[in-house]
Image (cartoon, rainbow, N blue to C red):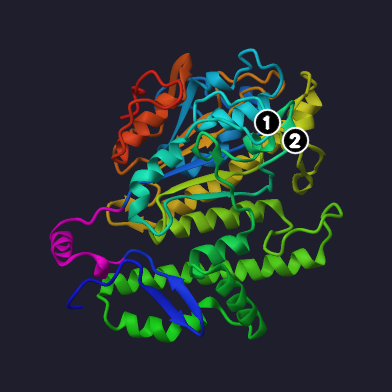
Amino acid sequence: MSKPLPRRTLLRGLGTAMALPMLEAMLPLTALAAAQQSTKKAPVRMAFLFVPNGMHMPDWTPTTEGPNFALPYLLEPLKNVKNSVSVLTGLSQNNARALGDGGGDHARSAAAWLTGCHPRKTSGANIKNGISVDQIAAQKIGRQTAFPSLEIGCERGGMAGDCDSGYSCAYSSTISWRGESTPVAKEVDPRLMFERLFGGADPAENAQNRDKRERYKKSILDFVMEDAKSLKAKLGANDQRKLDEYFSGVREIEHRLAWAEKTTKQMAVSGVKLPSGVPAEYGEHIRLMSDMMILAFQGDLTRVCTFMFANEGSNRSYRQIGISEGHHELSHHGRAQEKQEKVRQINRFHMEQLAYLLEKMQSIKEANGTMLDNTMLVYGGGISDGDRHNHDDLPILLAGRGAGTLKSGRHIRYANGTPMTNLFLSLLDRVGVPAETIGDSTGRLQQLF
């Protein structure tokens, strides 16, 4: 090509507009020449994955520090990616404590998890929290991608009403805050997320195109293939390969969405009708959303994502692993052994889904390693022991190597009470977004780099 391909180029056909991943052909000629003369670096991504209701901590915390720690029961599913994961013990979210506001630990724990701020206790419209680390990053590095950030989850939640002892539902159903009074709603329907990522910018057009594709049993790729062939003929070998990989991922997700929608129509789940794109099986729901996050990273559609496996205080049951009681109910176990064992199995189930995601990221090769190597992913929650509702010594994992800037594969013990926001300052430095403070931060974490 004699001049760079516009970054916002869309593949079009029969009314469909599909976004493209970042290609070498989109680089200015001077930048392309430089990239061809040296090893092309992949972008560094940030992801924050949240699980609710605390953790069975005796099966979470390794008994030894350093790189040779044995994986406890809850972390055993990570055996294939252990060298890319660090366990961080002692981090706390002090502003999730009551601080005179009484009950509401679940709402506060989610609200403070990425902000480090103490949310205003209200169930009305006058909510107040703080900007979250993902949105601080999105304001800067989000300018380089089609979507500044993605907010996804597997459980719907309202933005109004009382969900926890006088706290608005907004606090417990989102972890992403664009501003003090602006929570960012998450998308839980895989079909709608797919259309948002790959179907063009116009929601009305998306709906019409989806109906057309379903009527003619077509893939979104079938509608844009003529345009895609014309474009590929003008691309270099690297860009053609990248486009083929991207299309393969899109088609795989389409097939899984079709299967999920078919089985959902055939099943009644607790008498509640699920949205059309939400799989009846919870594990497949998590994996579908995980795969779309990965594909968005692969196509450089975004570099920042938050993912709530469930809302804080969720009372979802886990019948797929033989647990009919609600998660929140079980987390108030009162030291009862039977309830603790069920919490343990729920925690393990979540970890198995995380392992799926991390192993897939590890399998995707990039110019300077793997996608996991070029990611910084924080996994955990804002409550430690679900029965005690404590917000110190939180269950926190840090996965990925941050493009070689993180020293991974270790158990690091910090002084209990160390602000979790210190971790965020350190991670922001790695994506070129330095910040003076976040919430209750007191400085950068040591031993990570």
Residue assigned mark 2: 327
Whether residue 36 appears in magenta in the rendering, the answer is: yes
The residue furthest right is 271
Question: Would you say the residues marked 1 and 2 are in contact, meaning their CB atoms lie under 8 Å apart?
Answer: yes
Image quadrant occupied by the N terminus: bottom left
Relative image position of residue 133 (x, y in whole percent): 44, 36
Sequence-first tag of 1 and 2:
1
Q: Quadrant of residue 247?
A: bottom left
Residue 215 in the figure: left or right of residue 301: right
Image: 233 above or below 197: below
Q: Residues within 10 Å of mark 1 (few under 14, many from 20)?
A: many
Number of labels in the image equals: 2
Q: What SS does tag 1 mark?
A: loop
The residue range painted magenta reads 23-42
Relative image position of residue 44 (x, y in whole percent): 34, 47
Return the residue nearer the eye: 279 or 146: 146
Relative image position of residue 127 (x, y in whole percent): 61, 32
Magenta span: chief secondary structure = helix
**Amino acid identity at mark 1:** Asn
**Amino acid identity at mark 2:** His
Q: Quadrant of residue 210?
A: bottom right
Image: 222 above or below 311: below
Residue assigned mark 1: 53
Image quadrant occupied by the C terminus: top left
Q: What SS does tag 2 mark?
A: helix
Residue at 17 percent across and 78 percent down: it is: 2
Relative image position of residue 382 (x, y in whole percent): 58, 28
Residue 54 visible, this angle: no
Return the residue nearer the eye: 178 or 251: 178
Residue at 44 percent across and 17 percent down: it is: 414
Residue 116 in the figure: left or right of residue 303: right
